Amino acid sequence: GTLLFMDAYVDLLGGSAPEVHPLAVGYMRVAVVAGGVITAMNTLLSHLIRAEGKSFQASAGIIIGGVLNIALDPLFMFVILPRGNEVLGAALATMFANLCALIYFVVYIAVKHDDLVLSVRPGRGMFTDRIPVDVISIGIPACLMTLCENISYAVLDNLMQPYGTAAQAGVGVAKKINMLAHCTVRGMAQGVLPLIGYNFASGNRTRMRKTVRYSTAISVGFTTVCMACFMLFARELVTVFIKDTAAVSHGYAETFLRILCIGAPFSAWAYTVISFFQATGHMLKSLVLALLRKGILDIPLMFILNALAPVYGIVTATPAADIVCCAAAGVMFAVFIKKHGSDTLPAEVTEDVNAMGGGLI
């Protein structure tokens, strides 16, 4: 689909400008069409390995891909390919980095297959015990979350397009820097998902609540520090990525970053609760919160705030939606804990499990 409708996709995502369109198409051909399956398999295998309780090994594969991407970018952009192919070089670096990470995951599964429940061999057990139904019922909401998040980004880019490539470049850089906080929080939320799910299913709700409190404290604390740094050093951070451009001279990227980072601590809590409901099998609640943050609230707010405060209002919609979603997550979590937060194991068993687990792990 991407190969057939690539031009339409690029235009839909805000890349219709003549100086941008061919570069975006070239990037998509390599990173999305040629490397799409590789990227998808990376994500799948990292989640499956983490679900086995091997969070470190799953993180190692992701880190390998990220570090290699950073290392290969200048090599492909400025050394291997001739001048003028920098965007294509970045796409090739991304694809090869993801390929190396995928090889790591495949080798790890092959070497450790005796220690893992995970197996790449198909079997009849895949179609028993409502497994296909459960996979689809959980996968569709997760798919919708990602879809609505991408639609939200597309709307933002399209609304920003009339203000010129300087504004588009500025918001692109600001989002990338702000993703440092968001990606770390997502990693924390996803990393504790198996632990929350295990304790919820086993009936040890005390340990489950401790896990949530601990991960929330780390996530909110980290994003608060990030917000302070982004506020204080916005110009310095922006100039690491773009120098002497209109996006900097007009202060677009700098101002956008200061606006976006306000929502980081609020989204940290929202991410935690979204993952919590995923871990406990309440996908509908997780889906509602995810769509509330990306889709239901932020898209209408972009149009409304853009009319009230052109350019900057579009970006303000993101932290505004984060704040509302944070409040909704707090209410939903409190109601859930009140109803399902009590231990269902005998007290002596719970105490023994906590003692053996060291409280949290």
Image: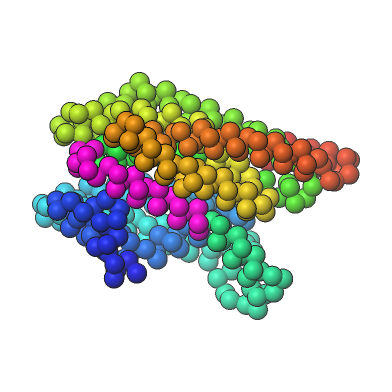
Please identify the quarter of the rendering in which residue 21 is found.
bottom left
Residue shown at 32% from the left, 66% from the top? 2
Work out which residue is located at the far top of the displayed protein and give it.
Answer: 232
Is 202 rendered above or below residue 167? below
Q: Residue 265 location in percent, x, y?
A: 50, 30
Residue shown at 64% from the left, 73% from the top? 126
Residue shown at 21% from the left, 60% from the top? 26
Left/right of residue 93 with respect to residue 207 in the rendered view: left
Q: Tell me, yes or no, whether the highlighted magenta stretch contains residue 3.
A: no
Q: Residue 6 location in percent, x, y?
A: 27, 64
Left/right of residue 89 with respect to residue 195 in the rendered view: left
Q: Which residues are magenta?
A: 143-167
- Pick the quarter of the image with the C terminus: top right
Count numbered badges in the picture: 0
Q: Residue 41 location in percent, x, y?
A: 45, 63
Q: Tell me, yes or no, whether the highlighted magenta stretch contains residue 164.
A: yes
Left/right of residue 6 with respect to residue 64 in the rendered view: left
* Whether residue 304 can be seen here: yes
- Pick the quarter of the image with the N terminus: bottom left
Please identify the quarter of the rendering in which residue 276 is found.
top right
The residue closer to the viewer here, 180 or 301, is 301
Work out which residue is located at the far bottom of the displayed protein and give it.
Answer: 124
Residue shown at 75% from the left, 51% from the top? 201
Q: Residue 122 location in percent, x, y?
A: 58, 76
* Whether residue 238 can be seen here: no
The residue closer to the viewer here, 59 or 343, is 343
